[in-house]
Image (spheres, rainbow, N blue to C red):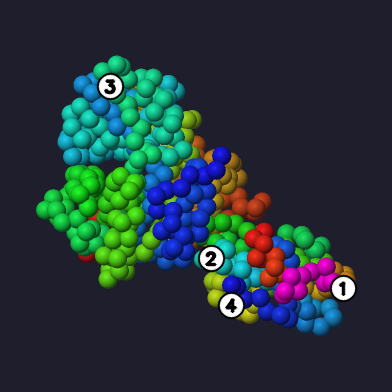
Amino acid sequence: MTAQRTFLYDDHIKLGGKMVEFAGWELPVMYSSIIDEHMAVREKAGLFDVSHMGEIVVKGRGAGAALQKLIPTDMGRLEKGKSMYTCFLNDTGGVIDDLFIFMLSVNEYYLVVNAATTQRDVEWLTQHCKTNVSIQDVSAATAKIDLQGPQSFNILKKIIRDDRLENLKRFHFFTGAYKGEPVLISQTGYTGEFGYELFCINNVASRLWNDLLEAGKEYGIKPVGLGARDTLRLEACYSLYGHELNDTITPVEGGIGFVVSAQSEYIARDIIENQKTHGAPRQIICLEMLGKAIPRSEYKVLYNNQDIGYITSGGYSPVFKKGIAMALVTSGVVSVGDEVAIVIRDKTSPAKVVQRPLYKYSGKRL
Amino acid sequence: MSNIPENLKYTKTHEWIEVQDDYTGICGITDHAQEMLTDIVFVELPEVGIEVKSGEQIAVVESVKAVSDVYAPVSGRITEVNKTLEDSPDLLNSDPYGKGWIFKIDIKVKHELDELMDAAQYAEHVASGV
C-alpha cells in the first residue's frame, strides 16, 4: 500500500520537508532541524500538519449516552464548546485508542483519534452504538493544522478576526470562519505549550497553512515536523498510542489515570475502578539520564540488577539537553529520586526517576 | 549537494577515510551522512586498541531521531578516538571531515583501500539515493 498524502504535501516539499512514512501517511519528519523546530515552539511558534489524524462525528439522540458506555471519563464534564481527553477501553481494560471528544451540541460530538487506529475506532463505535446514533468518519475530508507556542494568539488573530478568540479558554473551542469556510478552532495541543488546533476542509488547508506562516513570520514561526512533535510531547510527558498506551495497557497503568471519573457503567469499569483504588500492576515513570547516553523505546530498565520494565518513549530533550524517557515498570518498586539503569547496547547507563511531567504546561502567551 | 572532498576514500555506508601515510587512516562520517541525520546529540566511541575487521560496526552516532551505526572502512587496530565528540557531538554536523573525525586506525590490510570508493564514485552513490 502506498502512503497517503495530506493536502499540504506540496507545501512540505516546497519548504524542504524531509518526508517519511508514518501510520500510512507521507509526512515531514523535519524541515531544517528537530532541535530548532522544537525550540521555536517553546519560545515562539510552530506550525504542524497533522491532517493524518482521524475525525469522527457521533450524532443522534443517544450519542452522549452511547459514548459514556465506551469511556471511563464522565461525559458530564463536557458542555457545548468544550472538549476533553479520554480513551476507549476493551473488555480487559486495555486502551483501544486515546482521543479527544469535542461537544458540538448535546446530540453531536466530534472525536479526534489517532491515524493508525481510526478504522478500528469506527468499527468499535459502530458495534457499540444503537440505531439512534450515527457514526461518520470525516477524516478524509478534514485537514488538521496545529499552531503551537507562546506567540500563537498573536499570529492567529491576524488570520481569524473573531472576538471569541481573545478569551478562548483551554480545552474550549468555537467554529470560526476562514475564507468563508468553517474552521473549528480549539485551544488545545500536544506540545506542552499554549496553542491551537485548527480543523478545516481540505481545500482551504494550503491557503490557511501559508497564511499562518506569512502572518507568523514577524513572530519567528517555523513549520514543525513529526520529529519535534514527538520530542515536545515527550518533554511534556503526553502519552503516545502504541507506546505508553495500547491494547494491553490500562489507562491507570499508562499514566492517564486522571481520565477515570465516570460514575456510571462503562466497558471494563470493574477492572479500572479496582486499579484506581488498589493500584495497577505496572506504572509509567519519568526518567532523566545521568550520563550522555540516549534512552530509546524498548530499552530495558533495571533496578538493583532486576528487570523492572522497559522504556515506552525516549529521546533527547532539547530543553534539558539530555536524554529523557517514560518507562512502563512494575508498580511500587521505584519512586522519585531513585536511580535505575537503562540497558543500552548491552551496557547499562544510569538514570534518575523524576517527577512527571518533565516539562510543565504553563500556558504562557506572549 | 553535500561536500565530498577529493582526497578521501568512501564506504557505501557513508564513512570516509583519509590515508595519512601507508599505515594510518583517520575516519569519520560523510557530510551527506550528517545531513541525513541532522542534530547529532550522542556519539559512542570505540575503545582504543581493539582490532576490527572492515565492515564491522565500531561506533554509534545518535541524532535526536535515530540511532545510526558507524562501520570500519578497513581492517586494523584503533589507535586513537576523538574524545572531544563526547562533549561536542555537534562537531559531526558542523565539521564532519575536520574536527568531527571519529577514530584513527592502523591499517592492517592495505589492499582493502582499493575496494573503497573515490570521491566521484561516492558522489554517484549518494545521488543514487542508497
For the residues labelled 2 and 3, the Cα–Cα distance comes to: 49 Å
Q: Which mark is residue A133?
A: 3
- Name the residue rendered at 41%, 25% in the picture: A123
Eyeballing the image, is A160 above or below A299?
below
Judging from the image, mark 4 belongs to the subunit labelled: B
Residue found 50% across the figure and 37% down from its top: A330
Whether residue A97 is situated above or below residue A2 in the rendered picture: above
Residue B34 in which image quadrant: bottom right
Mark in front: 1 vs 3 = 3
Q: Which residues are magenta?
A: B113-121
Q: Which residue is mark 1?
A: B110
Q: Is residue A40 visible?
A: yes
Q: Say left or right for A349 vs A207.
A: right
Foreground pick, A270 / A338: A270
What amino acid is labelled 2 in the image? Thr
Labels 4 and 3 in the same subunit: no
Chain on which label 2 sits: B
Crowd rating for badge 3 (residues with CA inside 10 Å; few <14, some 14–19, many 20+): many
| Residue highlighted by disc 4 | B95
* Kind of residue at badge 4: Asp
Viewer-proximal residue, A303 or A152?
A152
Q: Secondary structure at mark 4?
A: loop
Residue beneath disc 2: B38
CA–CA distance in space, label 2 to label 1: 33 Å
Q: CA distance from mark 4 to mark 3?
A: 61 Å
Mark whose residue sits in front, 2 or 3: 3
